Amino acid sequence: MSKKTKRFFIFAVAVLLTFVAGFILPWLSQLSPGFLGGAPVVDGVLDGVVVEGGKDIYLSGEWQFFKGEHIISQNLENIEPDSYVKVPSPWTEYELDGHKLNNGGSASYRAYIKNIDTKEPFVVTVPNVPGQCKVFVDGECVFLNRGFYADSVTLTAGTYSQPVAPDFEDNVTHEIVIEMTCEYSSGLTTIPVLSEYEHFQSNTMTNLALRYLLVGIVLFFALAVLLFTIMRKDMNIQIWLVVLCVAFIFRMLISNTGYLASYRLFGGINYEIMVSLVFVSTYIIKLSMMMHLNNTARLNIKQNTIVFISALFLICAFVPYFLYDYIYVADAYIWLQSVPYILDIVMIYKLSEAIAEKKRFSAVHLVAYCITAAAIIIDNYFINGYISGTVSWVMPTACVVFISCMVLVHFVETIEAFSKAKEAARLSRELSDINMTLMLSQIQPHFLYNALNTIKYLTKKDPKTAETAIVKFSNYLRANMDSLTQKEPIPFENELEHVKNYISIEMLRFADRLSVEYDISFSDFKIPPLTVQPIAENAIKHGVNQRPEGGTVKISAYEEGGNAIVVVEDNGVGFDINQKHTDNRSHVGIKNIIVRLKEMMNAEVKIESVIGEGTKVTIIIPKEEAYNENNGSR
């Protein structure tokens, strides 16, 4: 399978599974409202329902609708409904007297439940509804939320509830009335729930505890990532994961039961406003995911694409604040929240491409992203009342899974980075030891003795030449000492000068027995210090010096295929490169040179030798290293 075919196959499968998983719950909920525990009300009546074992009954279906009236609070008796409306749905979907209903205002909903079967006190609640809501059972208030009075105490964000005692007689009918007051929204856009009172209380506390447990986990992840990011000094790469964690925590604090405990942190802002911020947080979460994956998975999304998506998200996120009358309805929000699906397709394609290219962790990135994308689709439909059941746990769970996967990948990469840094430190120490060994190997006593004796002899016979020899010998010693602290490659001209200083001293000793040729056609590159000089020393000492008549050493430097090439060859006695040598000193020096060239410049060293003909050592420095700006080259 070609890379292109593999990429298309992965993309097609991932898109299909993501959107099927995202739309299956809304579709099933519309097809069969009872599949998640729904109990559809038909023409304002629900006949027969069993409430037991902590089971929640979702009261969707056709409710009586009274626009502009609070029929219990206003003591309106024998009043006929204006219409029957589907619950959940915004009243902006309906018309009265030929006029389409607007956002805001007040209304009542009424339904009757016959033959309820329960042995425990029960309660009817309306969770997560944006507007102010009061629920009555048989004329008694059993539930109210933000903005109403209970026992002379204003509940700005919390809820009030009290149980209804069960009636054990057969054929008993209970009247349920829900009074709504909306500033921006439009009625029952979430589903009323009938449940045992103890189960409701326990479930509310459990959901709140789990929500803040997730907040704590993600907060810990954010701090851990921030700490490791600072240690690795790669803030630009991981900062979007921290932003994602913050956006997720913000959403958990302002949505569903989270706002019951955190409303004081936000100054008790009307929950209808906070619902809009829930949608805004979705865009921020999506954008953060895109930026994080683009950086860490190296998706190479074009800058223009990022700018376009960011601008589009910004517009969609804040449109509701300026167009409440037109946008603050379920259908409008559904369409606005569908905009990120464009991003989902782009991200799935880029991640599929990364898998086809076998980029590391790309499969983890794709699976985690697809799970979160599907969960956000489900959450979008749930908030807008298109799912007859509570699935508020889906989106937070998916986001925590995504964040956990990203943090796990980050921790693995951090551990590997520290391991590489440790290995680099070890290599640095080894290179320092090699430099020390190499430098000491070059300043051998016999060389110093021979050089000084030669200079002593010249001071009597040829003082001027002796003076020049002293300068060259001094330069030679200085270059060796400088190499102890030199950790970076040096210009080739500097190394060549050091070679010439050494050879000039040796030529004084060997006179006509040593001939040296230079063929330097290219020198604009860098090389580790004490690299060429030890090779030239070996060519003289173990090559031409072993022949009674002496010989020639040739040093060349040129460019080939963009690479820098340095060659040291002699016509000395040569040696068998496959034979194990007993003279460890000189060969250890060559091995050290090979290691330094490989570690510092990824260079290759080739050694060719024929007994009786001579030896040739070739250094090949790759183009990217020969001209590396970090090494000071052009």
Image (cartoon, helix red, strand yellow):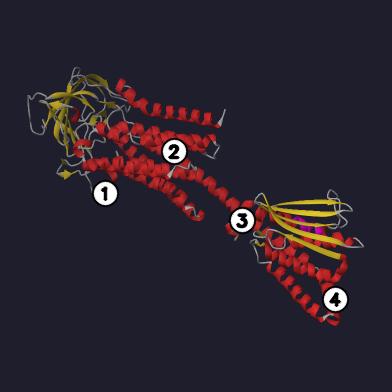
- Rounded to the nearest angstrom, the CA distance separating label 3 from label 1 is 58 Å
Which is nearer the N-term, disc 1 or disc 4? 1
Which is nearer the N-term, disc 2 or disc 3? 2
Amino acid bearing label 3:
Tyr
The answer to the question of whether label 3 and label 1 lie on touching residues, with beta carbons closer than 8 A, is no
Q: Is residue 293 above or below residue 124?
A: below
- Rounded to the nearest angstrom, the CA distance separating label 2 from label 4 is 78 Å
Residues rendered magenta in the picture: 585-591
Disc 3: which residue? 627
Left or right: residue 133 versus residue 443 is left
- Rounded to the nearest angstrom, the CA distance separating label 2 from label 1 is 27 Å
Disc 4: which residue? 453
Amino acid bearing label 4:
Asn
Helix, strand or loop at label 4? It is helix
Q: For residue 551, what is the image quadrant?
A: bottom right
Q: Is residue 273 above or below residue 120?
A: below
Which of the numbered marks, if any, corresponds to residue 401? Answer: 2
